[in-house]
Amino acid sequence: MSKNIIQHINKIFDHRIRLGIMSILMVNEYAEFNTLKELLGATDGNLASHIKALEKAEFIHIEKQFIGKKPNTRYSTSKLGKLEFKKHINALEKLIKQ
Amino acid sequence: MTQQDYLKDLSEIKHLMNKSSRFISLSGLSGIMAGVYALIGSAYAYWLVTTSVKGYLILDGKIFNIVLLDLFFIAFCTVVTAIFFTVRKAKKNGESVFDKTGLRAMANFLIPLVTGGIYILIILNQQKYGQTGALMLIFYGLALVNASKHTLGKIQYLGYIEIILGIICAILPGYGFWLWVLGFGVMHIIYGTFMHFKYDRKTL
């Protein structure tokens, strides 16, 4: 039983910033880099590296566009990301109840 | 990780979700309707004043009272329509107007608006009529900017425009009526149309 739960604890989410990014994107259609930075209180480099890790796992989509001449990047969750995040949360909850 | 750490993770997730979520059920249609009411109401006021015997507005006349009543009627219709459309859209989105994000958006909108409303009533009682239009625009703009932190849909830009119109209106009280029509009528229709096509259509 407990082995089963551990399987669902996702290594990729095992960091406060990554968990934070996913939490924010789960309840918002999308978020911009600066919004994430502000909410999580992370530095540019730190946030960027965690975003990269989530992107590599294909848990989030990155959408680059220009608003006028300013580059603007939006992040949103992928279907896979949503599914994995839910699994992760369920596993966490079960672990606590044990 | 210990059990304590997992618990901390979960409460952090919950906290971030609450803090970051925004109310998305503002209805574009209600914006358009608000603009239409404002235009009809102001056209009626314009007609009343220009066809009156004097042809201009005096402050203690009967017509002034009708214009005030007209104004309150516009405000009342706007609020009822906005509630109707927003509740309907919230239902469609599976959101509640009275959940945390909805209530927070509403509180942030109402605090500057009610403050402004009370202030305007107080100075109207002191027979200071000149700045009413400007004050309405400015406080409404501030209310929008304040609520925008908790809503999707970029209402802060509508707020900035209302504030700028209000300040121009304060400098040029003679154009108060036309600036009011522009701010509450035309801008609402433009913004409502933009919102409707950007957000509403997708969910319909």
Image: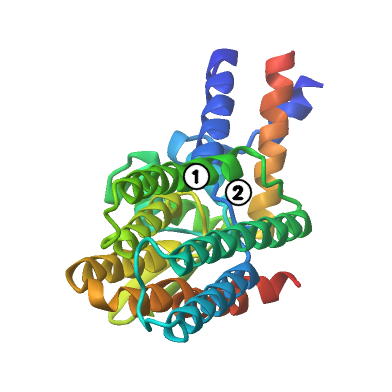
Q: Report helix, strand or loop for mark 2.
A: helix
List the residue tagged with mark 2.
Answer: A27
Labels 1 and 2 touching (C-beta < 8 A): yes
Q: Residue at x 39, y 50 (%)?
A: B146
Circle 2 packing at 10 Å, graded few (<14), some (14-19), many (20+), is some
Is B186 placed above or below B131 here? below
Q: Amino acid at mark 1?
A: Ser
Q: Amino acid at mark 2?
A: Val
Image x and y of residue A68, in percent: 32, 82
Q: Is residue B25 left or right of residue B162?
A: right
Q: Which mark is residue B20?
A: 1
Q: For residue A3, which quarter of the picture?
A: top right
The chain under label 2 reads: A
- Viewed as shown, does residue B32 lie left or right of B94? left
Spot occupied by residue A75 in the image (x, y as percentages of width and height) = 49, 61
Return the residue nearer the eye: B87 or B180. Answer: B180
- Image quadrant in which you'd find residue B61: bottom left
Crowd around label 1: few <14 · some 14–19 · many ≥20 (10 Å): many
Q: Is residue B154 visible?
A: no
Q: Residue at x 58, y 43 (%)?
A: B101
Between B139 and A32, the one nearer to me in the picture: B139
Query: Mark number for residue B91?
Result: none
